[in-house]
Amino acid sequence: MTTPTPDDALICSARGCRAPATYQLRWQNPRLHTPDRRKTWLACPAHRTSLGDFLDARGFLREVVPLPGSPTLES
């Protein structure tokens, strides 16, 4: 069970997760996006690896960075 977040809080992009996000997973689909374009998924510590693995398996993951203003947590 996750802790509810305020309506304006940035939450994890994992399906059904309502935990506060602490990471940005920046990705790009080279077949659809120009090389300089980055899309962003947000991740909580519990989903950082699974979301990153999903994107990486498809060759889309470009970088994972801490979300500004969030504590950096190691998973």
Image (cartoon, helix red, strand yellow):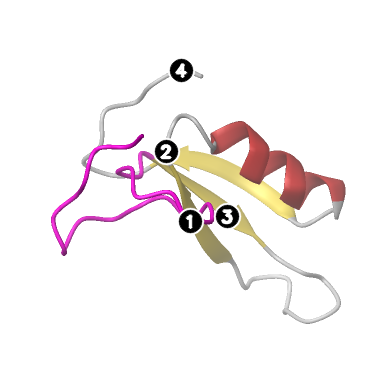
Please report whichever mark, 1 or 3, sits nearer to the chain's N-terminal start.
1
Tell me if mark 3 has few (under 14), some (14-19) or many (20+) residues whose alpha carbon lies within 10 angstroms of its own: some
Report the residue marked by disc 4.
Answer: 74
Q: Residues within 10 Å of mark 2 (few under 14, many from 20)?
A: many
Give the class, few, some or many, for how many residues have Cα within 10 Å of label 1's Cα (few <14, many ≥20): many
Tell me the residue that label 3 is attached to. 26
Toward the viewer: 55 or 31? 55
Depth check, mark 1 against mark 3: the one in front is 1
The residue indicated by pointer 1 is 13
**How far apart in space, not on screen, are marks 4 and 2 (Cα)?**
11 Å
Residue found at x 21% / y 46%: 4
Q: Which sits in the foreground, 35 or 75?
A: 75
Quadrant showing the N terminus: top left
Q: Secondary structure at mark 1?
A: loop
Residue numbers of the magenta segment? 1-22
**Residue 73 within the magenta-colored segment of the rendering:** no
Mark 2 or 3, closer to the camera: 2
- Residues at circles 1 and 4 in contact by the CB criterion of under 8 Å: no
Disc 3 residue type (three-letter): Arg
Residue that numbered label 2 is attached to: 44
Residue that extends furthest to the top in the rendered view of this protein:
74
Element under disc 2:
loop
Q: Earlier in the sequence, mark 3 or mark 4?
A: 3
Direction front: furthest residue: 1
Label 1 vs 2, first from the N-terminus:
1
How far is mark 1 from mark 4, CA to CA?
A: 18 Å
Type of secondary structure dominating the magenta stretch: loop
In the image, is residue 5 above or below residue 50? below
Residue at x 26%, y 28% (from the top left corner): 71
Tag 2: residue type?
Cys
